[in-house]
Image: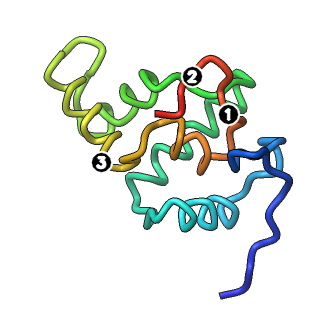
């Protein structure tokens, strides 16, 4: 497997410019986090990238939770059980946290007001 040329990152490993992201970079970042990307990971990552392209800001975790619930055929905005199930799914996909792993792998800058937990 050829090494991926990584774009500039900050001291915590987040991309400085989310525009430099691509799927090969995501795979390399995921390897650094010991995550094997599945279809569910890619679904969340692509949702996050689309949200970023539209809003120029990283998606808040609740939007990703809503997206995951929708992929499971549920409505997390109206059903608390569906929301809990989607939250568990998010933590299963990214066990060290949404900001620490999902945002990093999706090529987002580290959100300033969020913890890395």
Residue wearing tag 1: 110
Up-down: is 24 above or below 56? below
Q: Distance between the residues labelled 2 and 3?
A: 20 Å
Q: Which of marks 3 and 1 is nearer the N terminus?
A: 3
| Label pair 2/3, CB-CB below 8 angstroms | no
Seen from the viewer's position, the closer of residues 51 and 21 is 21
- Going by the image, does 110 lie left or right of 32? right
- Going by the image, does 115 lie left or right of 29? left
Seen from the viewer's position, the closer of residues 18 and 69 is 18
| Label pair 3/1, CB-CB below 8 angstroms | no
Q: Which residue is drawn at 84% across and 57% down?
A: 7
Q: Residue at x 32, y 32 (%)?
A: 70
Q: Distance between the residues labelled 1 and 2?
A: 8 Å
Q: Position of residue 108 (x, y in %)?
A: 68, 38
- Going by the image, does 70 lie left or right of 23? left
Q: Where is residue 82 in the image (x, y as percent from the top left)?
A: 19, 26
Q: What element carries label 2?
A: loop
Q: Disc 3 vs disc 1: which is toward the camera?
A: 1
Q: Where is residue 45 in the image (x, y as percent from the top left)?
A: 53, 46
Q: Which residue lies furthest to the left in this view?
A: 81
**Image quarter of residue 72:** top left
Q: Which residue is drawn at 70% across and 21% down?
A: 55
Up-down: is 42 above or below 47? below
| Label pair 1/2, CB-CB below 8 angstroms | yes
Q: How far apart are marks 3 and 1 (CA)?
A: 21 Å
Residue wearing tag 2: 114
Q: Earlier in the sequence, mark 2 or mark 3?
A: 3
- The quarter in which the N terminus is drawn is bottom right
Q: What element carries label 1?
A: loop
Q: Is mark 3 on a helix, strand or loop?
A: helix
Residue wearing tag 3: 92
């Amino acid at each position: 497997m050829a090494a991926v040329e990584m774009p500039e990152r900050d001291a915590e490993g987040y991309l400085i410019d989310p525009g430099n992201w691509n799927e090969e970079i995501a795979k390399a970042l995921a390897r650094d986090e010991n995550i094997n990307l599945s279809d569910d990971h890619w679904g969340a990552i692509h949702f996050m990238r689309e949200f970023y392209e539209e809003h120029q800001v990283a998606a808040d975790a609740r939007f990703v939770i809503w997206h995951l619930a929708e992929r499971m055929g549920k409505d997390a905005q109206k059903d608390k059980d569906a929301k809990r199930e989607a939250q568990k799914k998010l933590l299963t996909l990214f066990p060290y946290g949404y900001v620490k792993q999902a945002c990093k792998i999706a090529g987002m800058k580290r959100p300033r007001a969020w913890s890395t937990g």
